[in-house]
């Protein structure tokens, strides 16, 4: 039986949440859950019995930024691969230096995103 990898979506924009779910489906993945802000993301990540290997993370969100949420999530499980997807390239270095696996500028192709998720899963250490 093939195991379908689950990816956690963290973005406050409903249209992007929907888009990411569709991309995951195209790539053969499944959404582990969807959080609309950083605080919700941390809370949900703590509650997952089977932690997802990959998180798609936005930066600008209400209540807590993607970078702050990432720091807390990586403190819970430093193996998770966080892929930042943001139009705010000014935070790219900070995101990477705080443990993000990859930073994707908004305006990307579906193939680029699926490829990034596959690379993140391949680099995940059990």
Image (cartoon, rainbow, N blue to C red):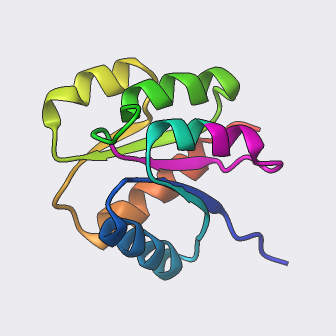
Residue at 50% x, 22% y is: 71
Total numbered labels placed on residues in the image: 0
Residue 66 lies left or right of residue 122; in this view the side is: left
Q: Nearer the viewer, residue 109 or 38?
A: 38
| Region in magenta | 43-58
Q: Quadrant of residue 47?
A: top right
| Residue 53 lies within the magenta run | yes
Residue at 31% x, 72% y is: 15
Residue at 31% x, 38% y is: 59
Q: Quadrant of residue 20?
A: bottom left
Q: Nearer the viewer, residue 56 or 103?
A: 56
Q: Nearer the viewer, residue 61 or 101?
A: 61
Image quarter (top left, top right, bottom left or bottom right) of the C terminus: top right
Residue at 66% x, 63% y is: 5
Q: Nearer the viewer, residue 3 or 32?
A: 32
Residue 60 x %, y %: 27, 40
Residue 75 x %, y %: 63, 20
| Residue 100 lies within the magenta run | no
Residue 31 lies left or right of residue 119; in this view the side is: right
Image quarter (top left, top right, bottom left or bottom right) of the N terminus: bottom right
Residue 61 x %, y %: 33, 42
Residue 9 lies left or right of residue 3; in this view the side is: left
Residue 84 lies left or right of residue 37; in this view the side is: left
| Above-or-below relation of 101 to 57 | above
Residue 6 x %, y %: 65, 62
| Above-or-below relation of 125 to 4 | above
| Above-or-below relation of 33 to 42 | below
């Amino acid at each position: 039986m093939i195991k379908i990898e689950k990816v956690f979506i963290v973005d406050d924009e409903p249209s992007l949440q929907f888009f990411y779910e569709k991309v995951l489906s195209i790539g053969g993945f499944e959404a582990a859950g969807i959080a609309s802000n950083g605080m919700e993301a941390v809370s949900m990540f703590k509650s997952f019995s089977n932690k997802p290997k990959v998180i798609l993370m936005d930066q600008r969100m209400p209540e807590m930024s993607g970078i702050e949420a990432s720091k807390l999530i990586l403190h819970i499980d430093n193996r998770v691969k966080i892929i930042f997807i943001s139009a705010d390239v000014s935070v790219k270095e900070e995101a990477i230096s705080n443990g993000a696996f990859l930073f994707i500028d908004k305006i990307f192709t579906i193939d680029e995103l699926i490829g990034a998720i596959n690379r993140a899963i391949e680099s995940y250490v059990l």
